[in-house]
């Protein structure tokens, strides 16, 4: 039984037939293939017609019997001579060994050596021989030792370099280890001293002689100088002979050089140069000599100063002067008309603010004027000696060592007494026997109600920053006069004359200390009970804390920081108002207490200790 590949699928089919010769027996559907190890017999017989017999192929070098003669690789197309036949190389014979082509040569390429032969078989003799370039012979001083050369198939050692006279060439000619030194002509004068040229000194620089320090010749110009240092002046400047000038003024003109001046000659004729962006005088330059240029300009009156006329881009302009500006109130003549601070629309009238008008500084109030800072209100004023020295609406008052006219603001003790837009502003020191408050506009940039104030925090809009808590407050007579959420609380105040009085201050309403910030406590007020509040957030009074003893009848009185001293039998202690027990100290209770006032009886929660 044998295995045969099919032509269509390259798979193997198994056939059970008796064969007399593998190369000639007929197998239906078998393609013609190589006989591999079998031998094709010319007289082989078969019981079936030989329709697909094995056919012999041409023999190649592949380790197979391609022609089915029983021999392997006995002949192949590549047989014959092989390898180079050039120089010292000789061709060999190609053979087949183990199915691979090989070339057997007697002499193949080798490294090139100096022997007059082509060792590497490239058609060249003794090129880049491996034995060339070795040092030979001893060095002479600092000169390098010679290296051998390949000449006519033999290595030759040339003569060693011999020291010679040093030259300016970047080489060590005298073999002393230095380059371009001790040259005889170094330092000699060089260059020309003719015309504008200046000589220099001969130096060797980077292997080349140069003339150091000379002023060399330059192309000739029309300037009455010998620029090219040939002994002649102004011969053949580059511009001479070229067209010049404006077409309409200097048409057809050419440049010529006369007495060191480049002139435009031959046109209708040069005119006077003007500042107009044109070459009026046909000299090849624009606007170089306008009659007005360089003259003074402007005026020197008041703050104005003279300038200088200059030609810029075809126009005459005034430079470096000080020009008039609009008049301002600064005691200076800004518009340079010989008058200071005048109102041009109203002759004889000053533009400076009058008495009581706003100002930024003394200069804004005109000659001899003063700018008064009256508790945040800045306005022009004047000095005075007493009653009747100031205009209507102003009074004479002390300001440090000066007596000045100030606005006569109406006195007040609450905002409700002031006109719309004004506030009852607190003015310390205005009056020793009353609360110093006046109806006046709010301070510009002042802090609003209940804002922390004082020091770096700033000033209140009404200057009313009171108490240890330092919050902006507001004078009042009743709670409805206060901002939303605030209540009017009667608060003790000491006048400058030492008298103790009570003033009404708008303060945030509260039902206990928890409603206030860390710097204030809930001070009770009987008038607030009808509004469902215990009191208002205010600073602690100068007195004992809640739970400590108190006695308002003692001398001096023993007051409470919450302003309420409770008496239970013979015992008196400081307490505070409350709505629930949460407003009191731990373990204390909130107990109602009846009060009788002109408005009738009512109850107030008072914290009571156990």
Image (cartoon, rainbow, N blue to C red):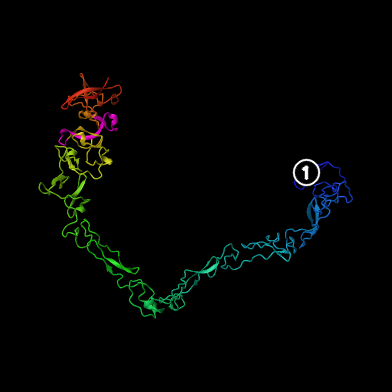
Within the magenta stretch, is there residue 502?
yes
Relative depth, front residue between 171 and 11: 11
Within the magenta stretch, is there residue 43?
no
Which residue corresponds to mark 1? 12
Range drawn in magenta: 495-523
Give left or right: position of 35 versus 277: right
Q: Position of residue 30 (x, y in %)?
A: 80, 47
Task: Report the residue at 20% width, 48% height from top.
Answer: 378
Q: Position of residue 409 (x, y in %)?
A: 16, 44
Relative depth, front residue between 577 and 359: 577
Point out the image quarter for the C terminus.
Answer: top left
Which SS class for mark 1?
strand
Point out the image quarter for the N terminus.
Answer: top right
Image quadrant where residue 461 sits: top left
Tell me if mark 1 has few (under 14), some (14-19) or many (20+) residues whose alpha carbon lies within 10 angstroms of its own.
few
The residue at the far left in this view is 388
Q: Position of residue 286 (x, y in %)?
A: 37, 72
The residue at the far top in this view is 569
Q: Determine if residue 403 is in view.
A: no
């Amino acid at each position: 039984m044998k295995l045969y590949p099919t032509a269509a699928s390259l798979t193997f089919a198994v056939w059970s037939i008796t064969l007399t010769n593998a190369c000639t027996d007929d197998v239906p559907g078998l393609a013609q293939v190589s006989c591999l190890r079998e031998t094709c017999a010319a007289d082989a017989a078969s019981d079936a017609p030989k329709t697909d017999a094995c056919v012999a192929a041409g023999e190649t070098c592949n380790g197979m019997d391609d022609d089915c003669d029983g021999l392997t690789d006995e002949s192949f197309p590549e047989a014959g001579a092989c390898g180079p036949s050039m120089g010292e190389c000789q061709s060999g014979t190609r053979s087949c060994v183990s199915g691979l082509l090989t070339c057997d040569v007697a002499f193949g390429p080798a490294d090139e050596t100096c022997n007059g032969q082509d060792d590497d078989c490239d058609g060249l003799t003794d090129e880049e021989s491996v034995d060339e370039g070795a040092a030979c012979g001893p060095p002479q001083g600092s000169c390098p030792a010679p290296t051998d050369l390949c000449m006519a198939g033999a290595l030759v050692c040339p003569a060693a370099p011999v020291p010679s006279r040093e030259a300016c060439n970047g080489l060590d000619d005298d073999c002393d280890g230095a380059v371009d030194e001790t040259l005889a002509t170094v330092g000699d004068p060089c260059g020309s001293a003719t015309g504008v040229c200046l000589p220099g000194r001969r130096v060797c620089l980077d292997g080349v002689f140069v003339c150091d320090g000379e002023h060399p010749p330059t192309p000739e110009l029309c300037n009455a100088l010998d620029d090219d240092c040939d002994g002649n002046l102004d011969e053949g400047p580059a511009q001479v002979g070229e067209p010049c000038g404006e077409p309409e003024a200097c048409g057809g003109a050419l440049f010529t050089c006369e007495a060191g001046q480049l002139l435009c000659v031959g046109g209708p004729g040069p005119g006077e140069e003007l500042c107009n962006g044109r070459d009026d005088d046909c000299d090849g330059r624009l606007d170089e000599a306008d009659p007005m240029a360089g003259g003074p300009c402007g005026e020197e009156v008041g703050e104005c100063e003279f300038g200088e006329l200059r030609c810029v881009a075809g126009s005459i302009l005034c430079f470096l002067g000080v020009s008039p500006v609009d008049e301002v109130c600064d005691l200076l003549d800004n518009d340079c008309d010989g008058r200071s601070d005048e109102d041009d629309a109203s002759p004889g009238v000053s533009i400076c603010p009058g008495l009581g008008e706003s100002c930024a500084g003394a200069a804004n109030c005109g000659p001899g004027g003063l700018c008064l800072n009256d508790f945040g209100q800045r306005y022009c004023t004047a000095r005075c000696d007493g009653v009747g020295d100031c205009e209507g609406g102003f009074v004479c008052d002390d300001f440090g060592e000066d007596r000045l006219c100030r606005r006569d603001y109406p006195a007040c003790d609450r905002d409700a007494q002031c006109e719309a837009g004004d506030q009852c502003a607190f003015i310390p020191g205005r009056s020793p026997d009353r609360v110093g408050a006046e109806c006046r506009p709010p301070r510009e940039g002042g802090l609003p109600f209940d804002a922390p104030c004082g020091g770096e925090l700033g000033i209140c809009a009404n200057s009313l920053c009171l108490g240890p808590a330092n919050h902006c407050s507001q004078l009042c007579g009743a709670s409805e006069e206060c901002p939303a959420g605030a209540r009017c609380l009667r608060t003790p105040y000491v006048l400058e004359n030492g008298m103790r009085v009570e003033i009404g201050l708008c303060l945030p309403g509260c039902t206990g200390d928890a409603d206030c910030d860390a710097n204030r406590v809930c001070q009770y007020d009987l008038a607030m009970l009808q509004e469902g509040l215990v009191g208002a957030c205010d600073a602690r009074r100068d007195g004992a804390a809640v739970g400590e003893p108190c006695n308002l009848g003692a001398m001096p009185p023993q007051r409470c920081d919450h302003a309420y001293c409770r008496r239970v039998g013979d015992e008196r202690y400081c307490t505070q108002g409350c709505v629930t027990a949460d407003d009191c100290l731990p373990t204390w209770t909130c107990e109602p207490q009846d009060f009788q006032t002109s408005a009738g009886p009512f109850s107030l929660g008072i914290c009571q200790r156990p």
